[in-house]
Image (cartoon, rainbow, N blue to C red):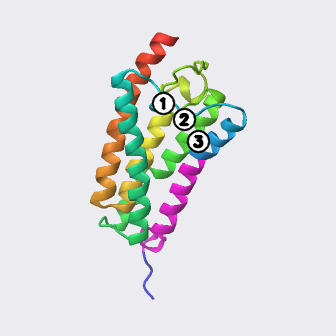
Amino acid sequence: MKTLPLEEALPCRVLALLVLVLFYGIYFGKAMAQKRKGIQTRQIGRRKERNIHTVELLMSAATLLTPASQFLSLALGWSCFPANARFTGFLLGDGIFLTSVLTMRDSWRAGIPDRDKTKLITSGIYAYSRNPAFLGFDLMYLGTFLLLGNWLTGLCSAFAILTLHLQILQEERFLEAAF
């Protein structure tokens, strides 16, 4: 009986689904926990400055299209990468994202707040990276693209990573002015 390499024996679609459910579960779970405390997590598109508003709307579109492409790719079984290329980075992205969200506690927001005042977090993972949540997103998008390996997730992942980078640049300007 021929034994398959570990990468080929593992159920890629099930693993990808688990990673996606974990990642998006962290995001929506944190948002729901903050909502129970009266905190408005989603701040995207609330700012009136045109450049901030535009980037946040593009980022919002990207972060909606990307999971749609990921789940569609899973449902249709689209993958063109060899099995040994599929297991890179996506769990690391989940771990970094979870750590960053937990470290930020109630200061975590999606988008630049227009009225909410938060604390500047400089401890934990934020002592090493100013944007670990975005790093987590980027690694998850890259890892999921490698896991699913098709043009649709590739394009959506690249679009999401680009818009998240534009958001980082805006948030850095906001943080410098606010703190």
Asked where in the image residue 115 lies, by quadrant, the reply is: top right
Q: Residue at x 42, y 22 (%)?
A: 48
- Outermost residue, bottom side: 1
Residue annotated with mark 1: 111
Q: Which residue range is magenta in the image?
A: 5-26
Gap between marks 3 and 1 measured at Cα: 17 Å
Please state which of residues 40 and 124 is positioned toward the viewer in this rendering: 40
Q: How crowded is the residue under tag 3: few (<14 C-alpha within 10 Å), some, or many (20+)? A: some
Q: Secondary structure at mark 2?
A: loop
Q: Residue at x 52, y 24 (%)?
A: 113
Please state which of residues 40 and 130 is positioned toward the viewer in this rendering: 40
Residue annotated with mark 3: 98
Please state which of residues 129 and 152 is positioned toward the viewer in this rendering: 152
Mark 2 vs 3: CB contact within 8 A: no
What's the mark number on residue 42? 2
Dominant SS of magenta comes to: helix
Q: Residue at x 61, y 40 (%)?
A: 31
Disc on the earlier residue, 1 or 2 = 2
What residue type is disc 1 on? Gly
